[in-house]
Amino acid sequence: MLVKVYGSAVFGVEATTITVEVHMDKGIGYHLVGLPDNAIKESSYRIAAALKNNGFSLPGKKITINMAPADLRKEGSSYDLTLAMGILVGSDQIKAPEIERYIIMGELSLDGSLQPIRGALPIAIKAKEEGYKGFFLPIQNVKEAAIVAGLDVYGVENLKEIIDFFAGKGTLQPTVIDTRAEFYKTLDFPEHDFSDVRGQESIKRCMEIAAAGGHNIILIGPPGAGKTMLAKRVPSILPPMTLREALETTKIHSVAGKLKEVGLMNQRPFRSPHHTISNVALVGGGSYPQPGEISMAHNGVLFLDELPEFKRDVLEVMRQPLEDREVTISRAKFTITYPSSFMLVASMNPSPSGFFNDPSMPNTSSPHEMQRYMSKISGPLLDRIDIHIEVTPVPFEKLSDERKAESSVEIRKRVTAAREIQTKRFEAVENVHYNAQMSSKLIREFCVLDEPSKELLKTAMERLNLSARAYDRILKVSRTIADLDHSENIVSSHIAEAIQYRSLDREGWLG
């Protein structure tokens, strides 16, 4: 007897439907074909124990299971439930005439209970596209899959529940989530708020500009100046995510298995990897490619604390994703692309001792040590960071000031207004939503300068010896400053402020 049951494989952030064909014949044996990995090959032991502990058995017949398409590599333990249901129906232990209308996924424990899987959201989206009636999956993943409207999503705790469902005896009901209601549960009182930061008004202004235009930013200052404190508050002033952005971000976190009983993500991610991170962990990859930190930060913030402490080759692999806003991982038989449109916030000490350029502290680093320290960050990488700003320690008078500083909610209103101007400006341009994403062609179109501004920029370019990419960055930042001022044209004051934010291009850092 031949039975077909349907599961799904996730490649990148997209799912592909897998047909599990179970054939029973005379003889004894268990043959699993269709490029399964070791985790799937070991499933026979989990399935046998789970069936036995739930009053069923692995039939003493020759069982041949094919996972089609057979030339596509299958990985992970999430096919246990699919295979178990195929075996039960194929051996006539249960009747399930409608089983072909459902996608079934889940990892079995030996007692028949289910463990969570990865990629539930992309699988649910694919099931809806291909017209399946429903999707059975572990109850831990049900919230993320139930985001998809028009698909019956059943959260299953153990094998017995799904068997009873097809026998018409169970009480299993589809989980229904109002996606829009879930999405609009926004937090107006963020955990990290700019009202907690004393002083640092110029840095807050800089952060506001960076958030308004989606610009990458690096904070340079001695230990204890507040760099990390400021960086952690950047997500609180970014505009709320759109529904499309929320779905994109949730998809990536679903594939990485990081959602943990959460439905739609409505807060922008903030990722802060340790400086010992490897290339693969940062940009993604591995023998079975998984999204890296830059993709986990998609539509949010990637914070690299103490930038020169990261290995140079790790930082260099980030150069291309910073430009293209996606990362492509190539293997012999397939290529996967993960989105990685994030805002980079980096911080660093100005010298190994941390107190270079600080008049109150002696400079304990030699010029050679300074040179070696700064050379860990390549020029091309610094060029991709639009804003460089020096952070100085806050004096005692401001630290002890009891007056309440401006809150993140107030700053976010201005940022959101500037972003709305940009959204309208780029509505006819595909994949461009804010100023930091502008190409050279768009810069020429939307960053037209008057004569005084041109002269000012020319002088700065010559004196600071700026690269062509730095020139583009200054224009992008000045466009954002103009948007915050609700100014249609860029004027010389906007250019002057943007030039200030190129600290590392100036002489004196390595002297």
Image: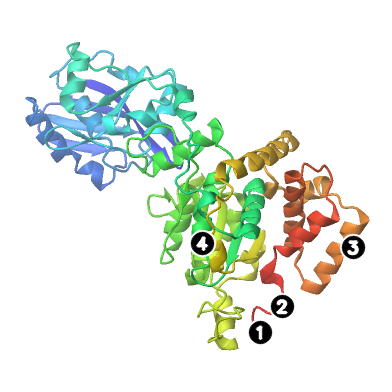
Can you say which quadrant of the picture contains the N terminus?
top left
Cβ atoms under marks 1 and 3 closer than 8 Å: no
Cβ atoms under marks 2 and 3 closer than 8 Å: no
Which residue, given by chain and number where applicable, does mark 2 sit on? 507
User: Disc 4 residue type?
Assistant: Ser
Q: Secondary structure at mark 2?
A: loop
- Residue 494 seen in the current view: yes
The relative height of residue 450 versus residue 41 in the rendered view (above or below) is below
Residue 400 badge: 4
Residue 511 badge: 1
| Rendering quarter of residue 88 | top left
Q: CA distance from mark 4 to mark 1?
A: 35 Å
Cβ atoms under marks 1 and 2 closer than 8 Å: yes
Residue 113 or 304: which is nearer the viewer? Answer: 304
Q: Secondary structure at mark 3?
A: helix
* Marks 2 and 3, the one that precedes in the sequence: 3
Q: Secondary structure at mark 4?
A: loop
Most distant residue in the top direction: 168
Which residue, given by chain and number where applicable, does mark 3 sit on? 455
Cβ atoms under marks 4 and 1 closer than 8 Å: no
Q: Is residue 125 left or right of residue 475?
A: left
* Marks 1 and 3, the one that precedes in the sequence: 3
User: Disc 3 residue type?
Assistant: Glu
- Residue 17 seen in the current view: no
